[in-house]
Structure formats: structure tokens, C-alpha cells
Amino acid sequence: MLQPSINLGLAESDFWDMTPGEIQRYNDGAAWRLKSKAQFDYMLANLIGISSARMMSSDVKFPTLEEAYPGLFEAKPEEVKALEEEELRIQNSTNRFLEFAMKHNAKRRSEGVET
């Protein structure tokens, strides 16, 4: 049990001060952390792949946080999702209008017309 415990990050001096039950719990916890990190690394790689695919095709949809990390976050109720999507549409519309207004005003200024 010593070498696997050291491989999981337990100091040898701590190993000899622990009971077999404590060593087993430490090893189980360390193995769980490694598996969790591997899962998150895999999900991150998948999300990077999806983001890259979005550059090639507008049909690719980026998953929500709940879809990307199932079991870690609770899915939002449909009403909340609908409200968030509507707020995003309004914000995008407002941003597009402001961008148009700024370009229009800049063009008018360059033509010598005061705004």
C-alpha cells in the first residue's frame, strides 16, 4: 500500500502515522480527484472542439452550462431559460442599433453634417 499511496501524493512520513482505514480513505479520495479532473479535462477538450466547429459552421450550437457539465449544475426551468433568451435577443438588438447609429453618425460627421 505504500507505493500506491506515495503515487497518489501521500508523504511517506504521513503514511506511517496513519491507520489502514485512513490510508484507504486517502487513496480513494485522491483517486476520485484524479478521475474528476480527467472528466473535466475531457469535457473542456470537447467544448474547445465545439467552439472550433462554430467557426466553421453557424449550425453548431454551443451547449449550455448544464448540458456541458451534467450532474454538476441543475437545469434551469423553461420559463427562466425563455426570459434569459429574450433578454439576450433584446441586448443583441440594442447593440446592433447602437452600432448602426454610431456608424451613421460617424459618416455624417465625415460629410460635415452635425449630429
Image (cartoon, rainbow, N blue to C red):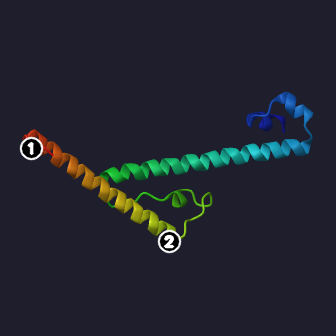
* Residue 102 at x, y percent in the picture: 22, 46
| Residue that sits furthest to the front in the current view | 114
| Mark 2, secondary structure of its residue | helix
Please give left or right for residue 92 compared with residue 3 in the image: left
Using a 10 Å C-alpha cutoff, classify the residue at mark 1 as few (fewer than 14 neighbours), some (14 to 19) or many (20 or more): few
Please give left or right for residue 89 compared with residue 82 in the image: left
| Residue that sits furthest to the top in the current view | 13
Amino acid residing under circle 2: Glu
Tell me if I can see residue 63 in this picture.
yes
Q: Residue at x 39, y 59 (%)?
A: 88
Between 77 and 40, the one lying in front of the other is 77
Between 77 and 73, the one lying in front of the other is 77
Write down the residue under mark 2. 79
* Residue 34 at x, y percent in the picture: 67, 44
Q: Name the front one of labels 2 and 1.
A: 1
Give the quadrant of residue 86.
Answer: bottom left
Between 49 and 2, the one lying in front of the other is 49
Q: Earlier in the sequence, mark 2 or mark 1?
A: 2
| Residue that sits furthest to the left in the current view | 111
**CA separation in Å, label 2 and label 1:** 47 Å
Write down the residue under mark 1. 113
Q: Residue at x 84, y 39 (%)?
A: 1
Amino acid residing under circle 1: Val
Using a 10 Å C-alpha cutoff, classify the residue at mark 2 as few (fewer than 14 neighbours), some (14 to 19) or many (20 or more): few
| Mark 1, secondary structure of its residue | loop
* Residue 67 at x, y percent in the picture: 52, 61
Q: Residue at x 65, y 49 (%)?
A: 36
Residue 89 badge:
none
Q: Residue at x 62, y 61 (%)?
A: 71
As displayed, is residue 45 above or below residue 62?
above
* Residue 56 at x, y percent in the picture: 31, 52
